[in-house]
Amino acid sequence: MVASATVPNHYEGELAELGHSYAAACAANIDSLKLAVASAAECSLIGVGSGGSFTVASLLCSLHETYTGRVSRPSTPLEIICSPALASSSPVFLVSAEGNNPDIVEALERARRFSSRPVHVLTNRQDSTLMSHVGALPGVKPYVFQLAKKDGYLATNSLLLDAVLVARAYAELNCRPSQMPASVEGLQVGDRSVEQWIDEAHPFLDEAVRRGALTVVYSPLLKPIATDLESKLSEGALLHVQLADLRSYAHGRHLWLAQRPEECAILALIEPSLGQLWEGMRAQFPAGIPTLAMPLGGCEPVHLIAGLVAQMHMVAAVGRLMGKDPGRPEVPSYGRAIHYTNLHDMIPLPKADAPAEESSKYEVLGAHWPARRDHGEMRRAAQAFTASLRAQRFRAVVFDYDGTLCSSQSRDGPPSPEVVSHLVRLVHAGVVVGVASGRGGSIQECLAAVMPEGVLTKIRLGLYNGGWISTADVSPAPPEETSEFLSHVTRIVVRLKSLGVPIDAHRTTHPYQVSVRFREGIATEGMWFVIADALRQAGLDLSTMVRSKHSVDILAEGVSKSALVAAIIQQDNVDPYQILTMGDQGAWPGNDAALLEHRYSLSVDLPSRRLDRGWKLAPIEKRDVDATLWYLEHMDAQDGMFRVQLPQAGLDGGEVHA
């Protein structure tokens, strides 16, 4: 974009490739990334990255605040490593171009370990250390956009690629998809092209280089641009930079103009709402202080991208004036040693104030800080339940399906080979295995596709939330009868959808249930109340409404997952205390609440609110299928019975799970 009279250095060569990266970002399919952003619309975000990736994280958080009003926080990996609780109440977006720096890998491990919220990873390499960890962790969603060429020392093309992807996601979700120009040359600083603005900035940059320092004052809405400029000038050892928004500068930092004017050169990143404020400030500066404005047309995604590109070229101009190549500095050996420090071994895990199983109960009870927690009563309850569980011999186990035997998802899928292997092991040992699900025939088909034929006949199914019960070798065939209650519910759901409620699909299965799914990314926690209030207004009973992570189900009277437990008790002559149940949504209105009301019950995610059952005893970092596998690995089965041989650590008031 910016012509040079001499041979381009490495950094300038990278900038010459920005057009290709911009075009690739504009052409990329970002549907999955948009769903990730949309799913977090009701939440604050934590954006995590280092260097150029921190800029993308800052851009993400800035746009999220602008469009959703949810305060969001860009963080360095070290902030998450030292305070992983930051991730406990907000979705986390980790950004890393190469995915090989140890900081982001350790941040991912700790964010996943200490949070049940979604963790998203935006990266430009499929084959990386980070992606190998993504594949091994539950509940982590990767978004991989391959980069044609690797960046040099400073982030350039990876930064622009990821920044445009993020900017597009928010712009398109805001129904403004056409703002981005067709090519990078169409980006503007005010009424000028980036090239024209850089040419006119050269006298100012000459003076800033001579003084060795740059003060950047900025509109808060343009902070990601200021953040990246400081990062590049500092990491490239080009200029000393201090940052302040326009009003923070007015609170004392202006003293440099009086006492150290020879070190002052001021760049202002402004948009129309603060143009007048900047002009008033500049009019008060002493004579001889060099100033320059980067007047962007606003704070829309396209303006932020223009500013990022403009400041990259500014860095190139500063490097050229200083005779340095920002893309290929001489990095000392100690710098590499510092960069690749083994953080996992050097920074200990934060100590929890209570074992994981107690903390999960407090959370589901709403006993958040600063509520007083009676650790004595909770610890005694945990110890009593665990001791009773260890001592008990079981003849049957009943699992929830989505989120327990397989990952919670909107589409049907079979359990993993590891889960299938354990289920087959239990069946061959003579244990009665049951599966209860809100889904219908698709579950039977999934199990039939992965289970040996002789095993299917010995697995009990309770489909449609326990309304239809049989063995897994039989396809469900609901009776041909209708329920006026369910018909009335269906009419209400159809009306809500016509009003704009984000219902993706609904299915009525007479005489068992109405299942309502929402658009991908829409949290069911809030939508449950929308459906419940509509039923309440119609005078209908709300007690049969339950929700999973992907749907809300309204059940007919008498339909419950606990019906499968009752069937096993009656048909297999099993003592109720010899049945263990397991699910992920154990607190009402979770759809496993009835299942985890059973005396011996375990949660793989959200526990029951009762203290005598429904505990999550798996390690804190294991949830959903990973927690199920952990429980299965500790089930010692033989002669038609099994015990749950849980380890002592962390379950008796001792050390927290590692």
Image (tube, rainbow, N blue to C red):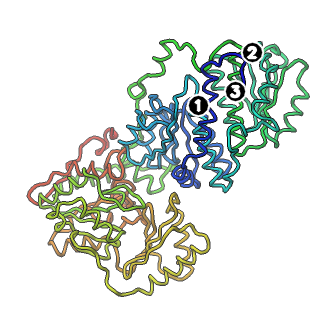
Residue 613 visible, this orientation = no
Q: Amino acid at mark 2?
A: Val
Local secondary structure at mark 2: helix
Q: Is residue 489 above or below residue 645?
A: below
Quadrant for the N terminus, please. Answer: top right
* Residue 209, numbered circle: 2
Quarter of the image holding residue 164?
top right
Q: Amino acid at mark 3?
A: His
Quarter of the image holding residue 572?
bottom left
Q: Residue furthest left?
A: 639
Instruction: Residue 390: give x, y in percent of width and height.
Output: 20, 52
* Residue 618, numbered circle: none
Instruction: Residue 566: give x, y in percent of width and height.
Output: 24, 73
Give me the C-alpha separation between circle 1 and circle 3: 15 Å
Instruction: Residue 109: give x, y in percent of width and height.
Output: 41, 37
Dot 1, crowdedness within 10 Å: few (<14), some or many (≥20)?
A: many
* Residue 313, numbered circle: 3
Residue found at x 23% / y 47%: 646
Give the mark nearest the N terminus, 3 or 2: 2
Give me the C-alpha separation between circle 3 and circle 2: 15 Å
Instruction: Residue 142: give x, y in percent of width and height.
Output: 46, 44
Quarter of the image holding residue 588?
bottom left
Q: Nearer the viewer, mark 3 or mark 2?
A: 3
Q: Are marks 1 and 2 in contact (CB under 8 Å)?
A: no
Q: Nearer the viewer, mark 1 or mark 3?
A: 3
User: What residue does disc 1 label?
Assistant: 52
Q: Is residue 214 above or below residue 642?
A: above
Residue found at x 33% / y 56%: 406
Dot 2, crowdedness within 10 Å: few (<14), some or many (≥20)?
A: some
Q: Is residue 473 above or below residue 163?
A: below
Local secondary structure at mark 3: helix
Front residue (pair 631, 239): 239
